[in-house]
Amino acid sequence: MYTNAVTVATVPVLLDVLMAADKFEVASCMRHCSRVLRNMHMTHKSALLYPELPSSVLMAKAVQPLTDTAKQFLAARYKDITKF
């Protein structure tokens, strides 16, 4: 059961918690996981994980700020694709 606290601190585990929260419709947990993920140092690897979430998770209002942040990160990082 969710007690308004999540003690994990790795992206893959937080994504698993986020998907479980979506499955059981625990919006407060989804908001918390999304906030924690947004506040973590984003890398291109972690940013690429977010668009691969199931559509039900991506459509959740609680997750929109996270996906927007990941999109902005990727757009800024690969702004000039000719460099890569």
Image: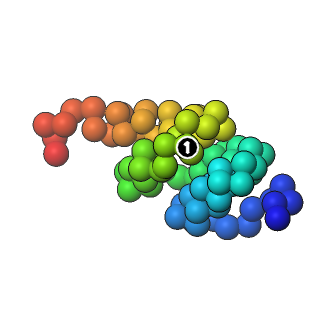
* In the displayed structure image, the side of residue 54 where residue 40 appears, left or right: right
Query: Which quarter shows the C terminus?
Result: top left
* In the displayed structure image, the side of residue 33 where residue 71 appears, left or right: left
* In the displayed structure image, the side of residue 14 where residue 83 appears, left or right: left
Q: Residue 43: image x %, image y %?
A: 42, 53
The figure's colour scheme reads rainbow
Task: Kindly tell me whether residue 78 is visible in this rendering.
Answer: yes
The residue at 52%/64% (across/down) is 12
* In the displayed structure image, the side of residue 53 where residue 62 appears, left or right: right
Task: Kindly tell me whether residue 36 is visible in this rendering.
Answer: no
Q: Is residue 48 above or below residue 76?
A: below
Q: Is residue 44 above or below residue 20?
A: above
Residue with the most extreme left position: 82
Q: Residue 9: image x %, image y %?
A: 63, 65
Q: Residue 41: image x %, image y %?
A: 53, 52
The residue at 16%/40% (across/down) is 83
Q: Secondary structure at mark 1?
A: helix
Residue with the most extreme right position: 3
Binning the other alpha carbons within 10 Å of mark 1 as few (below 14), some (14 to 19) or many (20 upward) gives few
- Camera-side residue of 82 and 56: 56
Q: Residue 40: image x %, image y %?
A: 58, 52
- Camera-side residue of 58 and 14: 58
- For the image shown, how many numbered marks are present on the structure? 1
Q: Which residue is mark 1?
A: 56
Query: Which quarter shows the N terminus?
Result: bottom right
Disc 1 residue type?
Answer: Ser
The residue at 65%/59% (across/down) is 20
